Amino acid sequence: MEQVLATTLRAAAPLVYAALAGVFAFRAGIFHLGLEGLMITGAFIAVAAGQAAGSALVGLLAAAAVCMVLSVLFWWVIGPLRADAIIAGLGLTSIGLGGTAYALTAIFDTRGTIFTEVVLPRPVRGVTEGWGVVVSESSILVWLMPVFVLASWVVLRRSRFGLRLAAVGEYPFAARSAGVDPSRMRLWALLIAGALCALAGAELSVGALRNFTENMTNGRGFIAFVAVIFGAWHPIGAAAAALFFGLADAVGTQSQINITEAVPREFVLMIPYVLTIAAVWLGGLWRRRSLEASAGYAELRAPDD
């Protein structure tokens, strides 16, 4: 039980941070399908910069800076250039996956995996029995998950910034008439989303692990986007959905260790994704409504008045 909980927290942490990023973007009226690309970029930069500086915290800050720059590029493409946000997001994911694979070869002259000695701080060390496994194997970003979820809820639901962001996402024309610049609010939302995706990637590479592997996100950015939808684009709901998907991943991981050889390994690896599909299906039955592009998203493709 203790090992399952520890595995769940480690598996859910990147999903929670990426899901919060998706919530901020969705509140601004943007379907952010570039979460995967930002996550893999953050994971690579955290390892590369952290190893060069000898500090995981420096790598984390560098990852946040690079992901925020990519977020500005994403905003420029879907804002001033009027590109389709979904296609641009998929392009951002392709850039992240392909760019990190190329950088792995160009910088480290290798393919596959690079290892690093830097790791994010762990508040508790050396406890390896009972419930101590849960705390000793968790990085500081796992401990800070509740703080980020609560802070996101306060910002989005109990602040003037959150109110303006919701207005921009739901009805930007009214927001503009009230003196709010929708383009600027979307930029802020994407910058926050970029920083959160950097945290997600860094937790994956220098938090739970000590290496970077080509395509190590393995679709987690898209699962995080599903968590945004399943959580009704609410920060707490999205975090809860991410924890559920983390539990599914943990069940798959533990099953590989404990299951007999009679069950094919491929079936075990399918568990997280089957549970994800089932959760989305059940969520659709429960809500009884389809997702439609918001007015904010529609405005991104509309010509200027």
Image (spheres, rainbow, N blue to C red):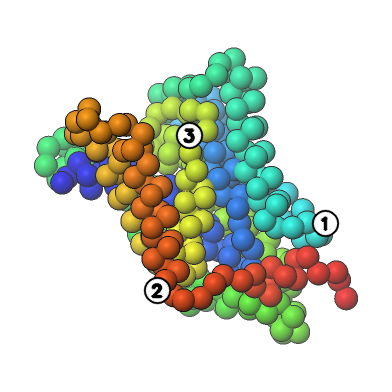
Q: CA distance from mark 3 to mark 1?
A: 31 Å
- Tell which of 55 and 236 is nearer to you: 236
Q: Pointer 3: what residue?
A: 216
Q: CA distance from mark 2 to mark 3?
A: 33 Å
Q: Is residue 216 left or right of residue 251?
A: right
| Kind of residue at disc 3 | Met
| Kind of residue at disc 1 | Leu
- Tell which of 41 and 242 is nearer to you: 242
Q: Is residue 295 left or right of residue 100?
A: right
Name the residue at the left extreme: 130
Quadrant holding the C terminus: bottom right
Helix, strand or loop status at disc 3? loop
Q: Quadrant of residue 138?
A: top left
Q: Pointer 2: what residue?
A: 286
Q: Pointer 1: what residue?
A: 81
> Where is residue 178 shown, x and y percent of the image?
72, 84
Nearer to us: label 2 or label 3: 2
